[in-house]
Amino acid sequence: MHLGLDPAGLAVEYQRGGAACLSVLTDADWFGGSSADLIAARNAVDIPVLRKDFTVDLRDIADARIMGADCVLLIVAVLDDKELFDFHELATELGMAALVEVHDEAELQRALQARARIIGVNQRDLVTFEVDRNRAVRVAAAIPDDVVKVAESGIRDRNDAEVLSEAGYRALLVGEALVKSNDPAAAVATLTGE
């Protein structure tokens, strides 16, 4: 696993801290993840698990289901409208949720046309990797109230979590701040306010 992390151990710590869901990287080339990481995390906890990877083929969704994932990541910026709709439909048919990731209002409209029910706003630019901590707040106002809003990337602490909660987000996808923590369970608890 990337950085020598223990996926099962981290999963247990995150759940102990109050995490409602896990995000597990399975992309090997860019992030050093693997399907084994997801399987290990899935077997260690009883909360839902998101396969965080570049989903670019219908087979990726079937593979996620086989690995035990409860949810897949669909990045609007890398899919055309037909792919987005078809991938979302297949995930639903296989009993999985789809976190549909957007970066701006134009991508949000495409996600809504694909019937997305869970929309994540990634504050990290996919080209420059720069984080815009105001992006999620800006885009939140355009997301319908009946859609689950997830803020992604660049979330450092309780203050960031509170700002995003006030903007209407019901979930946060946090990676770096938790992975770098000396006490992952406490870091999750701090973010969730527990």
Image (cartoon, grey):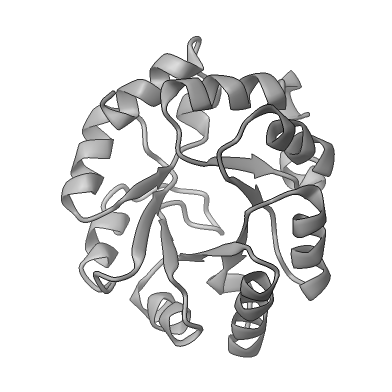
Specify whether residue 77 is in view.
yes
Give the number of marks.
0
Where is residue 108 shown, x and y percent of the image?
A: 39, 75
Quarter of the view holding residue 146: bottom left
Where is residue 54 shown, x and y percent of the image?
A: 70, 60
Task: Name the residue: 56% across, 65% down.
Answer: 98
Specify whether residue 32 is in view.
no
Q: Is residue 37 above or below residue 27?
A: above
Where is residue 11 shown, x and y percent of the image?
A: 61, 27
Q: Is residue 129 left or right of residue 186?
A: right
Where is residue 186 shown, x and y percent of the image?
A: 40, 15
Is 80 in front, or is 89? 89
Q: Is residue 113 left or right of residue 23?
A: left
Q: Quadrant of the N terminus?
A: top right
Q: Is residue 189 left or right of residue 176?
A: left
Q: Residue furthest top?
A: 182
Task: Name the residue: 71% across, 41% down.
Answer: 31
Q: Quadrant of the C terminus?
A: top left
Is 89 in front, or is 100? 89
Quarter of the view holding residue 9: top right
Q: Is residue 174 above or below residue 104?
A: above
